[in-house]
Image (cartoon, helix red, strand yellow):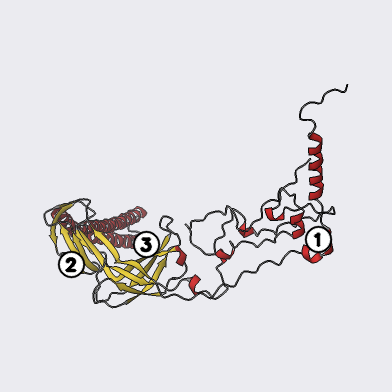
Amino acid sequence: MPPARPTGAAPRQPLRAALLALALAGTAVPASAQASPSAAAPPAAAQPAPRPAARATAPRPAGCLIEPDQVADVGSPVTGVLEHIGVDRGDAVTAGQTLAVLRGEVERAQAGVAEARARVDADVRAAAASLALAQQKVVRARQLLAQQFVSQQALDQAQAEADVAAERLAQARSQQAISQRERDAALAQLGQRTLRSPLSGIVVERYAHPGERVEDRPVLRVARIDPLRVELMVPVAQYGLLRPGDRVAIRPELPGNPVLSATVRLVDKVVDPASNTYRVRLALPNPDQRLPAGLRCRADLPPSAAAAAPAGVQPAAASAFQPTTQPALQPAARRALPPAIQPATQRTAPPAAGPATPIPAPAAMPQSAQPGATPVPPGGPAGLRMSPLLRLPGARPATPQVPQV
């Protein structure tokens, strides 16, 4: 009597045979695919439709702020008490004009003493007279020595006295120069008690009054409003539209004020990452000081570069991220896949056996479109927000592997 087979061993051999037949059938190519070479040829890649010509949009007004060109807080370099203030808020001043004076009785007295000492030249004149007398003695001693009326010692003594008189004259002149320097120092200390305007403009604020003590706080604030400074925040998408020297129309938010023209003075090279904008500074002439500072305004920006570009032309940064069109799988290669992997519409009877057609490799991916590459247009600003490409549209997935039996 033959031994009994274990349970489940009977269907194992038919299952292996079915898997083997499935693998052999998956690598076969039908005869129809070999007979018609045109069916195996990959279809032509779809050409992208040409982009329509972009229309230049009208200038978009942007918000801006009109500020003084320069603002200075005028203070005193020394500690003192205010004696006099000659200007008030709203007064027009010029560069170097006296604004306020501190008490300086002691400094004025010291400056007077130094001035009188510098003018004294009696020591210099006395030293010069002594030198002239000593030189005459030397001349006479030489004449007497030639006639043998005096000895050589008398001539040497006269020459030594002349040398001492010359040194005394030099010392007197040096002392006079030192007195003049002391006078200059005393006048400089007295000048620190006088507050002068560093620029031409108007007085914006007055922080102190006569009799108050001045230490480390300003006394007056002066602003220059000719020309005015216009600060403009421009989105980074419009970078490159404005350059130094360009003219921009400014519309102050002031009733009855006409449209003014400002000149671009500075374009920042660093973008603010928080707002994704960059700053542009303009100079607005204000010769008659009719326009006040601190106004809000609207600036007419030129149309963007993307809107003004001709048809079919794209920026370099945008063209670097265009997906690459991948060739579709050949019909023969699709039919060569196992039935378990084919789509539902392709699951038919296994084709006849034949040589397998390899699947063409995908086209090479451009280096600029590889994940992690962030091309930046040449000459662009710093501070741009860039994100690495995590997945490219149109990329083919990996070819599935046929299960091993």
Q: Which mark is residue 90?
A: 2
Mark 2 and mark 1: span between their CA atoms?
94 Å
- 10 Å neighbourhood of mark 1: few (<14), some, or many (≥20)? some
Locate residue 135, reporting x and y percent: 31, 61
Report if residue 119 is visible in the image. Answer: no
Label 2 or label 3, whichever lies nearer to me, is 2
On residue 181, the disc is none
Sequence-first tag of 2 and 3: 2
Left or right of 25: which side holds 215? left
Q: Earlier in the sequence, mark 2 or mark 1?
A: 1
274 above or below 240? above
What residue lies at 82% left-to-right and 47% top-to-bottom? 24
Which residue is painted at 37% across and 67% down in the image? 281
Q: Distance from label 3 to label 1 (Cα)? A: 141 Å
Residue 328 in view in this figure: yes
Quickly name the residue at label 1. Answer: 33
Amino acid on which disc 2 is placed: Gly
Q: Amino acid at mark 3?
A: Ala
Q: Nearer the viewer, mark 2 or mark 1?
A: 1
Cβ–Cβ under 8 Å for marks 2 and 3: no
Residue 41 is drawn in which quadrant?
Answer: bottom right
Q: Quadrant of the C terminus?
A: top right
Outermost residue toward the front?
1
Could you say where residue 278 lies in the image, as x and y percent from the top left?
42, 62
Amino acid type, label 1: Ala
Give coordinates of residue 368: x percent, y percent.
61, 59
> Depth check: 74 or 18 in front?
18
Q: Which mark is residue 146?
A: 3
